[in-house]
Amino acid sequence: MSVSPEAPRQTDAIESFWRSLWFFSIYRLAIALLFLAAALIFGDTISLGTQDARLFGRTAAIYVLAAIAFLVSLLLRPRYFNLQLSIQVAVDILALTVMMFASGGQKSGIAVLLLVVVAGAGLVGQGRMTLFYAALASVAMLLEESWRALTREADPADFVRTGMICIAFFGTAIIARLLARRVVANENLARERGRQLDDQLRISERIIRDMDDGVLVVDGEGRVRLQNPRAGELLDAKAAIDAGLGVLSEALSERFRHWQQQSAEAVEMVRQSGRPPLRVRYLPAAEVGGHSLIYLEDMERVQAQAQQMKLAALGRLTANMAHEIRNPLAAISHAAELLAEEDRDPLHQRLGRIIHDNTQRLNRLVTEVLELGRRDRAQPETLRWSVFLAGFLDELALHDPSSARRVFVGAEDVELHFDRGHLYRVLWNLLANALRHASAADGAVRLEARAAPTDGKVELRVIDDGPGVDDVSRGQVFEPFFTTHGAGTGLGLYIARELCEASGASLELLDAGPGAHFRIRAEGRICR
């Protein structure tokens, strides 16, 4: 079923047009009832209906019925705005002209109501067809005066007065059109500004709701008018609207009352019992007794961000330094080897081995520092655990032949989303530590894959039967340069965790004993 393009334009008139037409119809019904009541109660004792009381009364009754019909049509079927308005104005002009004729012509004063009809039609119709309505009213006035001159005695001066009234019709129509155009322009502007304001309010509410800082709006009496979710999290409380600030925090409420005495922008630290310290910023109201703004900033988060920035800068610095140190180390190691080959003195041989061992250790440290610079170049891919592990264990057996019998691999197979090179490095660090601390028994180190409780995640676990990690060291194992092995660099586990995070995974040390128990959680699925 198709709809003509004119139908939407007629039915989708602006709501204010219909509302104005509704009020215009109520005015029409009130005037019609007034004329009908005058005809029934007073008869011809007043100036209305003096020439033909019966015609006046019948016309007033028909006018009332027409006014009621127009109201009903607006309620039941608000369509074809221009057509309905034109019909109503035509009925107004016809009824008022007939009643004016029955009352003795334009001397009865009913012509003034025609001016109201023309002006009202021009404003209600927002300027559409205004001159047509003025012309229609003028023609009706001239016909009425002409018919009176032909059928009854008439003063020639009446034509002059009628002409002046007709001029007034057109003047009123033009003024109504100009006013209507301005009303439409202002209404459209107000509607557009309203939409823009609504958009701005929605955006502002979204920004405030998602802010990392807490925001409180507090009135002059210390009642919370508005707050975002972050403020409740930082204060570990939720206050109802119009509740006192003390419901959220007594310390903050006390500091707010103290700040109100100076009423100037201020920043201070507020410490809470059992909660992180807050950096509080007070903004005074624009007027006396108005609403003040309080911004709450979590200092632990600020310090963590500062620490991350420092670590990032330090990482770039150390990576550059490590790259520059590597070449001199290679030269020192090569020179020590040449000296050991040429000089057979036992003391010199021993000193050469010390130089060679320490240069190798420094070279490992440089290599691991350079690994930190590669964490941001992760290229995760879907890896089949069994296929990847087969090649990895073969290479591990070349460096530690005992790993072939000491590492037990679980039967479960998974697919995981991980950078291949990063996963190789992470497993190498974890298994090297596990083999170093585990016993020499077969299956002393277990390597298992399983589904994680979270959908779309898998877990890789490295478990050994060694002494485990003591309570003192447990909180430091992932810190850089922390090691319990004399020949270690202390960067292995730190780099492993960083590489896991680069692929969207996590590495953690579990409390399950008796040995060390590390868990990698990454995106993936179980292979059936």
Image: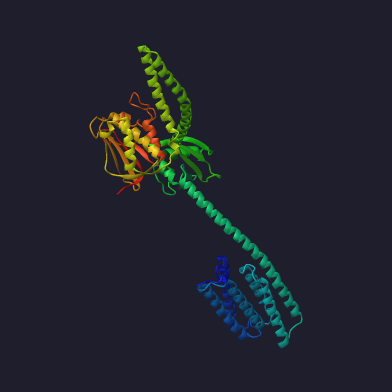
User: Does the image show residue 509?
Assistant: no
Q: Farthest residue toward the front?
A: 342
In the figure, is residue 434 to the left or right of 318?
left
* Residue 512 or residue 520, whichever sits in front: 520
Residue 468, position as x, y percentages in the image: 28, 31
Question: From this viewpoint, which residue is outermost toward the left?
Answer: 441
Residue lying at the far bottom of the rendered structure? 151
Here the colouring is: rainbow
Identify which residue, 207 or 517, lies in the foreground: 517
Residue at image position (42%, 32%) is: 371
Q: Quadrant of residue 380?
A: top left
Looking at the image, which is closer to me, 282 or 352?
352
How many numbered circles are shown? Answer: 0
Tell which of 22 and 209 is nearer to you.
209
Q: Where residue 48 appears, x then y in whole percent?
A: 64, 80
Q: Position of residue 29 (x, y in %)?
A: 57, 75
In this rendering, position of residue 313 left or right of residue 188: left
**Residue at coordinates 48% horizontally, 29% vertically from top-left?**
320
Is residue 187 depicted above or below 353 in this figure? below
Q: Residue 173 in the image: x percent, y percent?
A: 68, 70
| Residue 285 against residue 108 in the figure, above or below | above
Quick check: 156 above or below 500? below
Whether residue 111 is visible here, answered yes or no, is yes
User: Left or right: 273 with respect to 72?
Assistant: left
